[in-house]
């Protein structure tokens, strides 16, 4: 008995330690920069004071408290850390493709802090990425929001612990290909996709009801009520209905976007963000009215049938109609220059600097439910910051330094060639990867379902 | 058959009123030929410096004159005060026109079956009406090399202008035989071959390349000496590369492969152009010494090795140029060739400099492809492929105001813009009346 107590005490101690996993927090004073706050305009010749990972003060002529390093950013630009609302970086696996609904799986269980991609994203000013489950399922796994604290080898330190839960949904070609055409089960069509959604949510309501009845019954004296069997999948669906989880739905065509809006309405779900959303512009008023907006590519199209009728003006149309709009990467390469992707909205739709910058900062922050913590340069927010040489929306800009929680994780002047945290023991000769275009991982780990992996090359997103 | 025809015509007849209505309802702007005076601009000639307060006269598809005081005499005058004139950009390697939707096999025409098909003509398969073409040219890209891919000798690439309704109208006077040099690299995460397997495949492919080349050379010598040989179109085509009649575009990327390719080329009478050249920076001096020009890209790419500095793909073009290599840029694109100016900007920002980056997407490409007498700069006598912009076309905030190709004033619209016009303020909006 005593032994067990010791064990429990040890376990308790461990879990406390785990929950409060101490991430590094830094202090720094950035002087004389053009500060692009995003939410409060542009401040010329201004300073940003960071203490213990928090933006303490934004203003002019600030002085550094003792022990706080000062960085002269004269002639340079400071903006909030870039947030990518759609990424698959830092994940060991992406798809649990075994069923049209796999709500129970969690990306936070497969976070790989060694991924060199995280460092490369930092070199592009990205401090937070939404590490998503793939798009093989109608209702996929739960995503993880990562803070790019590269160098920490504990996955718990890479995960943004104070971000709300989110989950991946997917409509259209990918789930119908994997399940309908790959496995011969529903859904094979967009009708089937809707049925899978509605059946899943109705089952979750039944499950919730069964637990409700049990809870009532068991509170009675001398109750002999037995609890229903726990079902994590239905519990998660039930949490979605209760508004505890934000849906991030892979979608392309206007009809399927509108379908999910209707399903969400019917089940009282309001926490809904569309991902990719290439035809979002066709139902922009509906997206604006009912959802948390859309996270889109700047200009990707025509790689598959459901994105043929796309327009690079998508983000501008969505914005003009009042939808919260972000620009994402879904790609290990694209994530390296999201500032440039956002800048394309100026070519395609004449977005203002603040509108364009919002799409990679405060807007994705809103869609991930973390806008109270990050996404703009405001006193009290977490000090995720990037310093650029040249305006970040210029094609010639070069990111110089990237901070997460006030700690500098990238500095172009101190960048060593090899930034790997470890070298693979099994790869005696380092592999050379010839870049062959988009490096999305939306359909990774579904290879076994197809005759040739070539078939997957072009069907990734 | 007859009945089918009847039904078909009845169907067409029924459609006619609808087609007529569409004509009345929507304005269709066509490319327009004529005499144009682009007046009072800053002209970035590329080869002859930057000329302020200068006009450009376009006539008969050509740049007739570049100067300060050109008489308008019958020309349509376009006031370019405060605007900039550049030559149209040239993308040194794309699949534009050879594919419409990548995942729909029926629309993919860049990769023929087999390892040895140099006689496959990209120009034959170019779809002049591809939706991607107008999407591309509004960015100021007026000319692209469109290249077959796949096997060892996948086909013959062609340089095309992005104006015209037949491949012949689009053809810009350069063809080259494509070769994928045997690669020791991996093609991405899906490529899970062992190092040994890769080496074996590589050696085998090199041997095959040698054999094919030797045979083609013999084929060329024998035909030149009047021998009557069996019909062998593949060999007949590759023979043209062995004599230098058609240049050889060698796609090669890993450093050791580049070195092997330089060696492979030695002693051959081929006119060689390297393409891709992702790890060119590692062996830039050797490439420069070989005198082989390079079409590199895509610039916005991932480093080839995890241990490489993050910006190596951005810096690659500049490092090769600094070493003395003649460098042009390619997007490798199909639907997004429009990003060429932005790729060039990245190369510029990471060491190449703006001037050299501009050359890389204009005159260098024209010189490498042997068409510098027609393209690549704003000079009298050259083909009128021109961009007029309100700023630097490499910047996303710049508006491209006019694009001229072959002297035609091109409509600056495309399906993406028409969708914008239709859906920006949709009617009906959220609610029907």
Image (cartoon, rainbow, N blue to C red):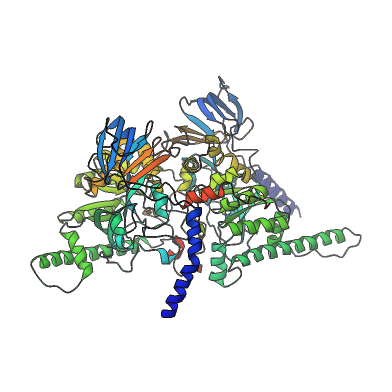
Q: Can you say whether A80 is above or below B289 in the image?
A: above
Could you tell me if residue A183 is visible in this image?
Answer: yes
Q: Can you say whether B55 is above or below B21 in the image?
A: above
The image shows residue A168 at horizontal and vertical percentages of: 61, 55
Q: Quadrant of residue B8?
A: bottom left
- The residue nearer to you, when weighing A287 against A374, is A287
Could you tell me if residue B336 is visible in this image?
Answer: no
Q: In what quadrant of the picture does the N terminus of chain B appear?
A: bottom left
- The residue nearer to you, when weighing B333 against A423, is B333
Name the residue: 54% across, 24% down: A46
**Residue, far left:** B225
Counting labels gives 0
Residue A112 located left or right of residue A370: left
The image shows residue A262 at horizontal and vertical percentages of: 68, 57
- The residue nearer to you, when weighing B246 against A51, is B246
Residue A100 located left or right of residue A343: right
The image shows residue A145 at horizontal and vertical percentages of: 59, 47
Q: Can you say whether A181 is above or below B398 in the image?
A: below
- The residue nearer to you, when weighing B397 against B75, is B75
């Amino acid at each position: 008995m005593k032994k067990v107590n010791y064990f429990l005490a040890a376990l308790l101690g461990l879990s406390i330690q785990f929950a409060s996993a101490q991430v590094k927090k830094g202090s720094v004073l950035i002087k004389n920069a053009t500060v692009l706050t995003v939410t409060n305009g542009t401040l010329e010749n201004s300073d940003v004071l960071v203490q213990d990972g928090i933006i303490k003060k934004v203003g002019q002529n600030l002085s550094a408290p003792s022990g706080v390093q000062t960085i002269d950013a004269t002639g340079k630009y400071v903006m909030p850390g870039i947030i990518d609302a759609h990424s698959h970086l830092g994940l060991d696996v992406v798809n649990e493709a075994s069923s049209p609904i796999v709500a129970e799986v969690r990306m936070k269980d497969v976070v790989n802090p060694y991924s060199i991609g995280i460092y490369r994203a930092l070199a592009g000013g990205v401090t937070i990425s939404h590490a998503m489950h793939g798009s093989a399922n109608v209702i996929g796994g739960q995503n993880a929001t990562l803070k790019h604290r590269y160098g920490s080898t504990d996955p718990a330190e890479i995960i943004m612990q104070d971000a709300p839960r989110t989950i991946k949904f997917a409509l259209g070609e990918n789930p119908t290909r994997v399940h309908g055409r790959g496995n011969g089960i529903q859904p094979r069509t967009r009708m089937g996709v809707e049925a899978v959604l509605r059946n899943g949510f109705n089952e979750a309501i039944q499950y919730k009801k069964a637990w409700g009845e049990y809870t009532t019954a068991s509170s009675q004296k001398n109750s002999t009520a037995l609890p229903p069997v726990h079902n994590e999948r239905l519990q998660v669906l039930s949490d979605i209905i209760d508004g505890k989880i934000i849906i991030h739905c892979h979608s392309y065509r206007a009809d399927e976007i509108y379908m999910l809006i209707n399903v969400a309405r019917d089940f009282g779900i309001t926490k809904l963000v569309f991902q990719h959303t290439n035809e979002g512009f066709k139902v922009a008023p509906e997206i604006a009215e009912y959802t948390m907006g859309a996270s889109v590519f700047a200009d990707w199209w025509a790689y598959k049938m459901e994105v043929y009728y796309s327009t690079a003006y998508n983000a501008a149309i969505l914005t003009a109609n009042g939808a919260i709009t972000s620009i994402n990467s879904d790609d290990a390469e694209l994530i390296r220059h999201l500032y440039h992707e956002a800048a394309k909205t100026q070519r395609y739709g004449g977005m203002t600097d603040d509108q364009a910058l919002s799409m990679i900062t405060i807007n994705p922050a809103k869609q991930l439910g973390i806008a109270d913590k990050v996404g703009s340069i405001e006193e009290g927010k977490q000090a995720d910051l990037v310093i650029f040489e040249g305006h970040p929306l210029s094609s010639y800009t070069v990111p110089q330094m990237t901070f997460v929680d006030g700690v500098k994780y990238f500095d172009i002047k101190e960048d060593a060639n090899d930034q790997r945290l470890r070298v693979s023991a099994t790869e005696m000769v380092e592999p050379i990867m010839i870049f062959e275009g988009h490096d999305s991982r939306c359909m990774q780990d579904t290879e076994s379902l197809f005759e040739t992996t070539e078939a997957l090359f072009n069907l990734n997103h | 058959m007859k009945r089918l025809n009847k039904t078909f015509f009845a169907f067409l007849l029924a459609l006619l009123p609808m087609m007529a209505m569409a004509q009345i309802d929507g304005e269709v702007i066509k490319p327009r030929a004529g005499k144009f005076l682009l007046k009072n601009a800053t002209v970035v000639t590329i080869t002859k410096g930057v000329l302020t307060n200068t006009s450009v006269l376009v006539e008969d598809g050509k740049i007739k004159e570049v100067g300060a005081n050109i008489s308008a005499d019958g020309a349509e005058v376009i006031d370019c005060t405060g605007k900039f004139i550049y030559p149209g950009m040239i993308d040194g390697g794309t699949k534009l026109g050879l594919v419409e939707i990548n995942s729909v096999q029926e629309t993919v025409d860049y990769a023929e079956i087999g390892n040895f098909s140099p006689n496959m003509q990209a120009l034959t398969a170019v779809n002049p009406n591809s939706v991607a073409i107008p999407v591309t040219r509004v960015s100021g890209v007026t000319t692209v090399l469109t290249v077959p891919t796949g096997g060892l000798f996948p086909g013959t690439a062609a340089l095309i202008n992005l104006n015209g309704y037949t491949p012949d109208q689009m053809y810009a006077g350069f063809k080259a035989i494509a070769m994928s040099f045997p690669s020791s690299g991996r093609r991405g995460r899906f490529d899970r071959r062992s190092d040994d397997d890769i080496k074996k495949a590589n050696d085998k492919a090199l041997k095959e390349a040698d054999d094919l080349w030797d045979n083609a050379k013999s084929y060329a010598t024998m035909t030149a000496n009047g021998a009557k040989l069996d019909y062998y179109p593949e060999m007949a085509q590759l023979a043209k590369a062995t004599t230098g009649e058609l240049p050889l575009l060698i796609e090669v990327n890993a450093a050791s492969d580049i070195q092997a390719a330089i060696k492979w080329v030695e002693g051959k009478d081929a006119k060689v152009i390297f393409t891709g050249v992702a790890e060119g920076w590692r062996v830039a001096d050797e490439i420069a010494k070989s005198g082989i020009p390079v079409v590199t890209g895509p610039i916005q790419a991932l480093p080839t090795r995890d241990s490489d500095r993050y910006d190596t793909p951005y810096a690659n073009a500049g490092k090769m140029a600094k070493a003395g290599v003649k460098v042009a840029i390619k997007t490798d694109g199909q639907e997004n060739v429009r990003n060429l100016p932005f790729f060039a900007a990245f190369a510029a920002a990471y060491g190449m400099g703006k001037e050299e980056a501009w050359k890389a997407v204009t005159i260098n490409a024209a010189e490498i492809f042997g068409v510098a007498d027609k393209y690549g700069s704003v000079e009298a006598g050259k083909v009128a492929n021109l961009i007029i912009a309100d700023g630097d076309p490499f910047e996303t905030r710049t508006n491209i105001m006019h694009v001229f190709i072959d002297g035609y004033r091109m409509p600056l619209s495309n399906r993406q813009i028409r969708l914008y016009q239709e859906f920006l303020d949709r009617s009906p909006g959220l609610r029907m009346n």
